[in-house]
């Protein structure tokens, strides 16, 4: 059975209705029909844009791992843990801006990323030992979170609303 997403408020609809029950926008049967892949791609785009806007100022940002300055369009949302698995994909606490070289060609530059995350946790008040334990637990955890259509729509809603606040 196909599912739909309101193009105005991003409400997930399990089945076709003429109008969105939240914002009363007309649902277009062909255009508003969504697959899990389409929702995941849209959610990632909105989330990555949010991370870039959060971590950049005046259209420029500093790569978290190499420290070089880049235009916002040349930066990516990089994860502390490699793999873009479901359990970490939308975890904003462990995602920072990175240049393409660090994020892709150096596989996230994980050693430097990890050290900088530990430093951030220590600055926030954790002891060094607790910060290291926190990062180790995060890196070794295995979650089997399923990215449901409802969850993906909630990510789109959440980060579309946060956009332009930074």
Image (spheres, rainbow, N blue to C red):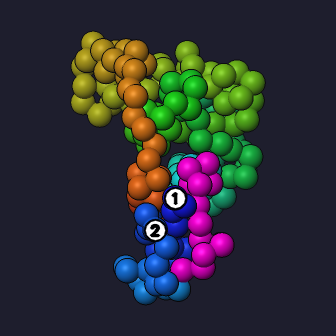
Residue 30 forms part of the magenta stretch: yes
Residue nearest the viewer, comparing 71 with 5: 5
Question: Residue 43 versus residue 97: which sits nearer the camera?
Answer: 43
Q: Secondary structure at mark 2?
A: loop
Residue 20, above or below 111? below
Q: Residues within 10 Å of mark 2 (few under 14, many from 20)?
A: few
Q: Please give the label number shown on residue 1.
A: 1
Q: In the displayed structure, would residue 56 be above or below residue 158?
A: above
Q: Which mark is residue 15?
A: 2
Report the residue at 63% width, 36% height from top: 98
Magenta residue span: 27-39
**How far apart are labels 2 and 1 at the CA level?**
8 Å
Residue 73 can be seen, yes or no = yes
Q: Residues within 10 Å of mark 1 (few under 14, many from 20)?
A: few
Is 69 situated left or right of 78 in this image? right
- Contact between marks 2 and 1 (CB within 8 A): the answer is yes
Q: Earlier in the sequence, mark 2 or mark 1?
A: 1
Q: Classify residue 137 as left or right of residue 14.
A: left
- Left or right: 142 as drawn, with respect to 113: left
Rendered residue at 39%/34% (across/down) = 145
Residue 95 visible here:
no
Q: Is residue 147 magenta?
A: no
Please state which of residues 60 and 137 is positioned toward the viewer in this rendering: 137
Kindly state the secondary structure of the residue where label 1 is placed. loop
Residue 44 drawn at (x, y percent): 57, 49
At a point 46% along the width and 59% down the height, the residue shown is: 153
Identify the residue at the far front of this view: 1
């Amino acid at each position: 059975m196909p599912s739909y997403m309101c193009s105005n408020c991003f409400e997930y609809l399990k089945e076709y209705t003429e109008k969105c029950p939240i914002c009363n926008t007309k649902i277009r049967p062909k255009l508003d029909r969504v697959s899990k892949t389409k929702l995941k791609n849209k959610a990632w785009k909105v989330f990555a844009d949010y991370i870039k806007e959060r971590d950049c100022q005046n259209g420029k940002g500093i790569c978290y791992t190499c420290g070089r300055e880049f235009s916002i369009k040349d930066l990516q949302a990089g994860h502390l843990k490699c793999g873009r698995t479901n359990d970490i994909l939308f975890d904003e606490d462990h995602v920072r801006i990175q240049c393409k070289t660090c994020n892709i060609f150096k596989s996230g530059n994980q050693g430097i990323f990890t050290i900088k995350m530990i430093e951030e946790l220590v600055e926030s008040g954790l002891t060094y030992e607790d910060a290291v334990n926190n990062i180790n637990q995060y890196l070794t955890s295995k979650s089997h979170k399923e990215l449901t259509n409802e969850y993906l729509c909630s990510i789109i809603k959440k980060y579309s609303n946060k956009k332009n606040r930074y």
